[in-house]
Image: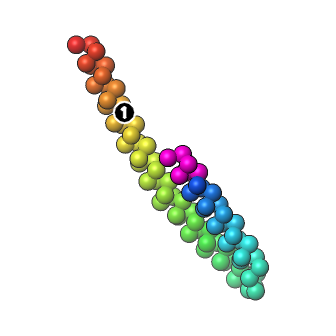
Amino acid sequence: MNKAIGLSIGLLAGAVAGGVIALLYAPKSGKETRKMIKDQTRDVVDTVKEKTSGVIEVFKDGASELNHTGHAAVNALKN
């Protein structure tokens, strides 16, 4: 799981860096380039939010299940 998250972050960072470099070398005006960077940054931020919300939900569900299991084990030991 940690390797997958690390790989995803690395790929995302590489894609962002590649996109920024490509935009900086594109034959467009400064105004157009800044708008493209702004739009692409917004897209990347939205994508990251979508991906991390899914990971956060998985961790929340896992923690909730672990909590439930722990309570059940404590109750079983008490009886």
User: Which segment did they paint magenta?
Assistant: 1-6
The picture places residue 35, in percent across and down from the top left corner, at 66, 77
Residue 77 lies in what quarter of the image?
Answer: top left
Q: Which residue lies at the image location 46% right of the left edge and 50% below the top edge?
A: 55
Q: How is the image coloured?
A: rainbow
Q: Is residue 16 above or below residue 25?
A: above
- Can you give x and y, in whole percent of width and height, for residue 21 in the image? 74, 72
23 displayed left or right of 58: right
Instruction: Please tell me which residue is depicted at 39% across the width and 40% down the height of the picture.
Output: 62
Most common SS among magenta residues: helix
Q: Is residue 34 magenta?
A: no
**Neighbourhood count class around disc 1 (C-alpha, 10 Å): few under 14, some 14–19, many 20 upward:** few
Element type at mark 1: helix
Report the front residue among 48 and 15: 15
Choose top left, top right, bottom left or bottom right for residue 79: top left
Q: Which residue is rendered at x = 54% and y = 45% of the image?
A: 2
- Determine whether 31 is above or below 69 in the image: below
Q: Give yes or no for residue 2 being in the magenta stretch.
A: yes
Q: In the image, what residue occupies the spot 56% across and 57% down?
A: 8
Q: Residue furthest top?
A: 79
- The answer to whether residue 61 is left or right of residue 46 is left
User: Where is 15 relative to 55, above or below?
Assistant: below
